[in-house]
Amino acid sequence: MESPVCIKKKSNSVKCKHNPRRADLRLPSICIDIRSPASYNTGALNFTIVEVPDMRKSMIAAVIFAVLLSTGGCSAKKSAKFVRQGVPKGSQVGIIVDSQNSIKNAIIAKFLDKGFKVKAVNASDIYTLGDHFSIADYKYLAYQSAESSAGDGAESLSSTQKSYDSIYKLHVYNYEANKAEILAEMKSKWGLRYLVIMDLRDWGSLSWMRAIDLETYEIIAVENYATRTTDSIESVVDHFLETVSTQAQ
Amino acid sequence: MKAIPLLVLAALFAAAPVHGATVIGFGLFENRSDDRDLDFLSGILINSFAVSVETDFDITAKKPAELEQYLEETGMELKGSYRDKELYDLASALPVNYFVYGSFRPVPENRIEMTVNIYNKDTGELFSFVNTGKMETEIFNLVDRLTGIFEGCFKEDFRFKSDDIPAKTKIAFITNLDARELNEFYMEFMKQGYRICPVQGNDLASPVSAADFDRLRHVALKEKSFQRITNTPPLVFSLSQWEGKKEITAQRELRDIITRYVYRYPAEQEKVIKELSSQYRFNIDYLCIVGFDESRERAWIRGFDLTHFDSSLIWIESGIKPMPSASGPSGIAASIIHLSGKQGQK
């Protein structure tokens, strides 16, 4: 984006002080180059640059406002972390991240580089019951069976509500119990000691990470990280790796 | 003629409590034992509760004799236990905000076991609990203790808490937060030395939809429950001479489902929570269900103590707001930590 106050002349061009290597062009680049009044004689073209003090103040105010606005926007997505204990190098670590295989490979490579022994766990390994059976469907079925066997349909609908509520609640508790059983299997089958769960998001969102010690069944580290414009997948994973490798706070 | 409008107005207000004042109606405390010599205790307990409640809190108590006049032509009666629809209809006919009733029976070692039910007519919620104390000289200590429990039950934001959740214990949470909010929530507890068990924290997303999460608000274990009462009529399974074996089998199956998930639900819930605890190798001291509203500035909590063989419901509270120093999930977490150490109603 060309600054409105950068003036290019035929033979004596003014260079804009912007970073041509900016990774993300979504942020506007602002370049200010205010010259004192002068006259230039290029021969073919004569023109005078006149300083306009009000314009400069307006530009400075606009820059400050833009910086404050962007800072305010970013603070809505706050980075924060807490580490109860780190994951020692050489530990057997399972990684859960819902991404394409190429990205998973890049993440695994990073962990291997750091000295961890890695097993990539597919998100589908901890399958959700919702994928296979929707409790909401059961509600409809329960109403249908109640209608056929218990007289007036309208009364039956309301009468089965309580059992539906109870079934749903037990479904939630059972789901968590089933997951715990799967975690225990992962630990025993694959010899995992730690589980690291990550969700990597684009600039403007929060990526997050959680690390679990499968020996004590405790969460040992959590982090929300506001992905920066200069971040890539590798840099975010590097950041999380640094967190999980940190000693306790 | 002039009296007619007055009578109409009086009738209109008959079933409504006094505006601006909380009114508690006390029904019967039924003697569930065969020892009729203990029947006198019913009157003593009701009178003691009514006096304590009026003295300690700014509310009006109505005793059974006052309530019976409203039931004369309805065919309903005051007793120690009710089916859902019976309770709903009875409370609708009474000019009260809350209806309290229950039962008692003697148990070994000269003790008395009381079952107390507190029904909130406005919200339709019923809180039931069992409390045991010594007979004779300590009966009035029992009344005082129960009155202390009542205090939180008659507030706009319900509160019952019988035990603290100390720091450095192991807590598991089930919430309706998304992953990032859950991290914020966990961080507050971890900073204060709590150890978080990864129930709900061990996958990418929660399986509980926001719309359905509210169902977890109502919980029931054998000795305590917090449920919603509706005026649903009982199911009637009618059979005619043309019903065959297939139809009878289908109806029995449905009856078994209703029995298991409605009438025996507390036992089922207790079984499942024990199973959850055992899967984590009994590494969970407390299980807390925390529901947030959409703004994340208000929450409710249901806390279970899993450290004893019989899981116990120790905390029921609504209307939790964030601490002044923080907002959102971390503010609510700070508030829960602050409240978890407050002396409970024993």
Image (cartoon, rainbow, N blue to C red):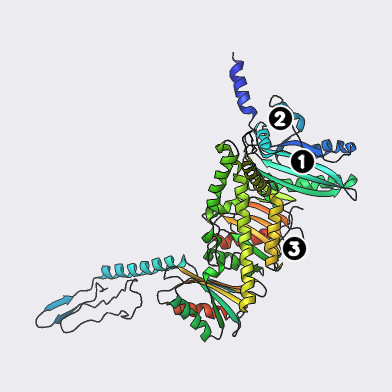
Q: Do the residues labelled 1 and 2 touch (CB within 8 Å)?
A: no
Identified at 60% across, 23% down, the residue is B9
Q: What element carries label 3?
A: loop
Residue A213 in percent (x, y) is at 63, 75
Amino acid at pointer 1:
Gly
Chain bearing tag 2 is B
Q: From this view, report whether residue A231 is shown above or below residue B288.
A: below
Q: From this view, report whether residue B173 is shown above or below residue B156.
A: below
Q: Does label 1 or label 2 sit earlier along the sequence?
A: 2
Residue B248 in percent (x, y) is at 64, 41
How far apart are labels 2 and 3 at the CA level?
43 Å
Query: Which of label 1 and label 2 is nearer to you?
Result: 2
Chain bearing tag 1 is B
Q: Does label 2 or label 3 sit earlier along the sequence?
A: 2
Whether residue A113 sits left or right of residue B31 in the image: it is: left
Residues tagged by mark 1 and mark 2 found on one chain of the structure: yes
Residue A218 visible to the viewer: no
Residue B307: mark:
3
How far apart are labels 3 and 1 at the CA level?
28 Å
Rendered-image quadrant of the N terminus of chain B: top right
Q: Does label 3 or label 1 sit earlier along the sequence?
A: 1
Amino acid at pointer 3:
Thr
- In terms of image quadrants, where is residue B20? top right
Identified at 60% across, 40% down, the residue is A149
Q: Is mark 2 on a helix, strand or loop?
A: loop
Q: Is mark 1 on a helix, strand or loop?
A: strand
Q: Mark 1 points at which residue?
A: B102
Q: Nearer the viewer, residue A216 or A74?
A: A216
Q: Mark 2 points at which residue?
A: B76
